[in-house]
Image (tube, rainbow, N blue to C red):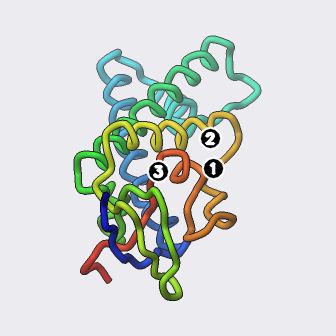
Amino acid sequence: MFAGREYSIPSPLQRFMAEMVDFFILFFIKATIILSIMHLSGMKDISKFAMHFIVEEIDEDTSMEELQKMMLVALVYRILVCFYEIVCIWGAGGATPGKFLIGLRVISCDSSVLVQPNRVLVVPATNVTLSASTVRALNKNFSIAFLFPAFITVFFFQHNRTVYDMVAGTIVVKRTGAR
């Protein structure tokens, strides 16, 4: 039996800021990979390619072949994002770079009890396992593909948890010693 620990709960704004930092890191990685592929394949028209595959913009002149390539790029990007989150949450102390910079981390949570405003007792409050990290990342990232942004549920569940946190048995907390 694990005793549990007391933590402060981050606001939805803090979680959003952490997500934005991670978004920009991942967007930069995506752009770098796509531009490298473009350079290696000898493509000359950077602007159209960049709009299609980096920004994923579609216009009336977009061909079926380009749409298929965009779908493939989007799928590969989702897999990259999942891998990034799995490795960071499981192997890097429970925090992606965005969460780390904002002073947050993800821990295991079978139960959480409010002990003071914005403070909860979390049980077992251990590091997230590889399987829980994988479940969390897959639920979070592929819910977007099905047009259900699961992060919105942060406003509906106790302690600012999302549906993917609940399914994975995790909770986002402020790092001990973080401001």
Quadrant location, the N terminus: bottom left
Q: Which mark is residue 124?
A: none
> Is residue 4 shown left or right of residue 63?
left
Nearer to us: label 2 or label 3: 3
Q: Residue at x 46, y 75 (%)?
A: 9
> Is residue 3 shown left or right of residue 153?
left
Label 1 residue SS = helix
Q: Which mark is residue 169?
A: 3
| Front residue of 152 and 2 | 2
Find the distance from the CA under tag 2 to the CA under tag 3: 20 Å
Q: Which residue is mark 2?
A: 144
Quadrant location, the C terminus: bottom left
| Front residue of 96 and 90 | 90
* Amino acid on which the number 1 mark rests in the picture: Ala
Label 3 CA crowd tier, 10 Å (few <14, some 14–19, many 20+): some
Q: Residue at x 69, y 64 (%)?
A: 156
* Amino acid on which the number 3 mark rests in the picture: Gly
Q: Residue at x 46, y 76 (%)?
A: 120
Compared with residue 82, is residue 44 higher up or lower down, i.e. above or below? above
Q: Quadrant of residue 65?
A: top right
User: CB atoms at circles 1 and 3 under 8 Å apart?
Assistant: no
Q: Quadrant of residue 33?
A: top left
Label 2 residue SS = helix
User: CB atoms at circles 1 and 2 under 8 Å apart?
Assistant: yes
